[in-house]
């Protein structure tokens, strides 16, 4: 079992930056892919950026590519989402997610993720 706890959300003006953190606890080797999804009320949850534990191979969605990056500190079992040049449309609840299946296939498939955090809210004002 893996527990995920997010932090770092908040309110920021358009053009600003935020760094989200997600720390995994429990079975530190119980997942192979970890990263971030987001959800706007009334819309489906969508992938933002994920990374493979250890190797650091990353996948970044087109919606944030060039503005955001995902990284990890394996010594702290923590994954980060650095978001720059934020836009109002980035406003959402951001969730950390992890899965046992390794990366490559269907990394944006919400149903394939085994563990989820409670989410952290990001609000970008214009």
Image (cartoon, helix red, strand yellow):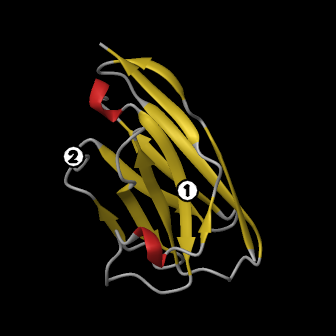
Is residue 75 placed above or below 122 in the rendered structure? Answer: below
- Helix, strand or loop status at disc 2: loop
Which mark sits nearer the N-terminus, 1 or 2? 2
Relative side of 101 to 73, left or right: left
**Cα distance in 3D space between marks 1 and 2:** 20 Å
Q: Which mark is residue 96?
A: 1
How far from the left and from the top, in percent, is residue 83?
A: 38, 39
Is residue 45 placed above or below 75 in the rendered structure? Answer: above
How far from the left and from the top, in percent, is residue 36?
A: 46, 56
- Helix, strand or loop status at disc 1: strand
Q: In the displayed orientation, state which residue is furthest to the front.
A: 42
How far from the left and from the top, in percent, is residue 112?
A: 46, 78
Q: Quadrant of residue 87?
A: top left
How many marks the image carries: the answer is 2
> Residue visible at 53% across and 51% down?
95
Q: Are marks 1 and 2 in contact (CB under 8 Å)?
A: no
User: Which residue is denoted by mark 2 in the rendering?
Assistant: 66
How far from the left and from the top, in percent, is residue 113?
A: 51, 73
| Within-10-Å neighbours for mark 2: few <14, some 14–19, many 20+ | few
| Within-10-Å neighbours for mark 1: few <14, some 14–19, many 20+ | many
């Amino acid at each position: 079992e893996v527990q995920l706890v997010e932090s770092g959300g908040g309110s920021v003006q358009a053009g600003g930056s935020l760094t989200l953190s997600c720390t995994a606890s429990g079975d530190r080797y119980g997942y192979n892919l970890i990263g971030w999804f987001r959800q706007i009320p009334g819309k489906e949850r969508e992938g933002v950026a994920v990374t493979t534990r250890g190797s650091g191979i990353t996948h970044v969605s087109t919606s944030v590519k060039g503005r955001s990056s995902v990284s990890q500190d394996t010594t702290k079992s923590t994954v980060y989402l650095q978001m720059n040049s934020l836009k109002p449309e980035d406003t959402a609840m951001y969730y950390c997610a992890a899965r046992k299946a390794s990366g490559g296939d269907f990394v944006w498939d919400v149903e394939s993720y085994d563990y989820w955090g409670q989410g952290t809210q990001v609000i970008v004002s214009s």
